[in-house]
Image (cartoon, rainbow, N blue to C red):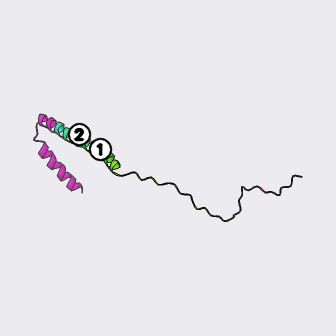
Amino acid sequence: MTAIGDWIEDGLRSLLGRITPDGRIITIVILLLVFGAGSIYMTVSSIYNMGKKNAQQQMQIEHIERLELERQQKADSLKLNKNMNYE
C-alpha cells in the first residue's frame, strides 16, 4: 500500500511541479469556485426538493384510538386498604 501511495505522490509531484506559481494560484481559485458552486447547488437543491416532496404528499390525519387495556383485576400496590385499624 505504501508503494502505491508513493507512486501516486511521485506522479502528482512530477505532473504539478511543471506548473508555474501563477498557474497554481489560478488552478486553486478555479477549483475553489467549481467546488464552492457545486456545494451551494447541492445545498439549495436539497432544501428545495425537501419542501417540494412534503408539499406533494397529502397530509393524512388519523385520530388517536383508545387503547384496549387489560380488564383483569390485578393486585395494585397503590390501592388503599379499606379495612384499616386506627387503634
Q: Amino acid at mark 1?
A: Tyr
Q: Name the one closer to the observer, 23 or 70.
A: 70
Image coordinates of residue 69 in percent, x first then y, are 60, 61
Image coordinates of residue 64 in percent, x first then y, are 52, 55
Q: Quadrant of residue 28?
A: top left
Q: Is residue 14 magenta?
A: yes
Q: How many marks?
A: 2
Magenta range is 1-26
Q: Residue at x 76, y 55 (%)?
A: 80
Are there few (<14), some (14-19), or many (20+) residues within 10 Å of tag 1?
few
| Residue that protrudes farthest toward the top in the picture | 22
* Residue at numbered disc 2: 36
The answer to whether 59 appears left or right of 79 in the picture is left
* Residue at numbered disc 1: 48
Asked if the residue at tag 2 contacts the one at tag 1, i.e. Cβ–Cβ closer than 8 Å, the answer is: no
Q: Name the one closer to the observer, 81 or 19.
A: 81
Are there few (<14), some (14-19), or many (20+) residues within 10 Å of tag 2?
few
| Residue that protrudes farthest toward the bottom in the picture | 72
Numbered disc 2: secondary structure: helix
Of badges 1 and 2, the one in the foreground is 1
Work out whether mark 1 precedes mark 2 in sequence or the reverse, and give the earlier one.
2
Q: Residue at x 22, y 40 (%)?
A: 37
The answer to whether 69 appears left or right of 8 in the picture is right
Q: Is residue 51 magenta?
A: no
Image coordinates of residue 12 in percent, x first then y, are 15, 47
